C-alpha cells in the first residue's frame, strides 16, 4: 500500500510549472491579465485598485488564500505567506510563494 506523501513527492512538478500555475491562479482571482499583474513594479496596493474583483486588502488576502488552497489541492504543498505590506510588488509575492513551496516540498522529502 502506498502513501500519498511518497506518491506526491515522486510526481512533483518542476518549479517553472508551479510558478506558471501560481501566476495563472492569482491572475484568475484578481481578474487582471498575467502580463499586467506580474510587472516588476506593480504593488499590491495597485492590484487592489486595478482589480475589478477587489475593493480592499481583505479581497487581496482572499485571493492569496484561494491561490494557496489551489496549490495545496493540485500540488500537495501547504503554502503560507507572511503578512506583506501593500507596497510589496507582485513579483516579490510570487518569489515568496515559490520559496514557501520549495520549503514545503523539501520538508516532505
Image (cartoon, rainbow, N blue to C red):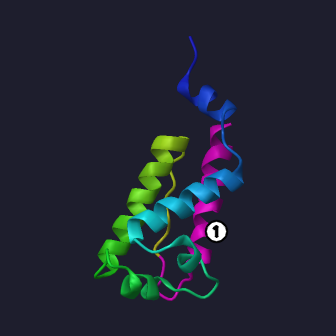
Residue 86: within the magenta? yes
The correct choice, above or below, for 83 with respect to 40 in the image is above
Q: What residue do we see at 50% from left, 42% from top? A: 74
Residue 104: within the magenta? yes
Give residue 5's quadrant in the image.
top right
Q: What residue do we see at 54% from left, 83% from top? A: 88
Closest to the observer: 53 or 106?
53
Q: Which residue is mark 1?
A: 95
**Chain part drawn in magenta:** 84-109
Q: Is residue 60 left or right of residue 20?
A: left
* Position of the C terminus by quadrant: top right
Give residue 39's quadrant in the image.
bottom right
Which secondary structure is most common in the magenta stretch? helix
SS class of the residue under badge 1? helix
Give residue 75's quadrant in the image.
top right
* Position of the N terminus by quadrant: top right
Residue 57 image position (x, y, % from top left): 34, 79
Q: What residue do we see at 33% from left, 79% from top? A: 52
Closest to the observer: 46 or 24?
24
Residue 16 image position (x, y, % from top left): 70, 55
Amino acid at each position: 500500500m502506498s502513501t500519498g506523501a511518497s506518491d506526491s513527492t515522486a510526481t512533483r512538478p518542476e518549479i517553472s510549472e508551479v510558478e506558471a500555475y501560481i501566476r495563472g491562479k492569482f491572475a484568475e482571482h484578481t481578474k487582471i491579465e498575467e502580463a499586467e499583474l506580474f510587472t516588476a513594479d506593480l504593488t499590491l496596493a495597485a492590484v487592489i485598485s486595478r482589480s475589478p474583483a477587489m475593493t480592499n486588502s481583505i479581497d487581496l488576502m482572499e485571493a492569496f488564500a484561494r491561490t494557496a488552497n489551489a496549490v495545496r489541492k493540485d500540488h500537495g504543498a501547504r503554502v503560507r505567506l507572511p503578512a506583506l505590506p501593500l507596497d510589496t510588488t507582485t513579483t516579490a509575492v510570487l518569489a515568496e510563494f515559490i520559496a514557501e513551496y520549495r520549503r514545503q516540498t523539501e520538508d516532505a522529502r
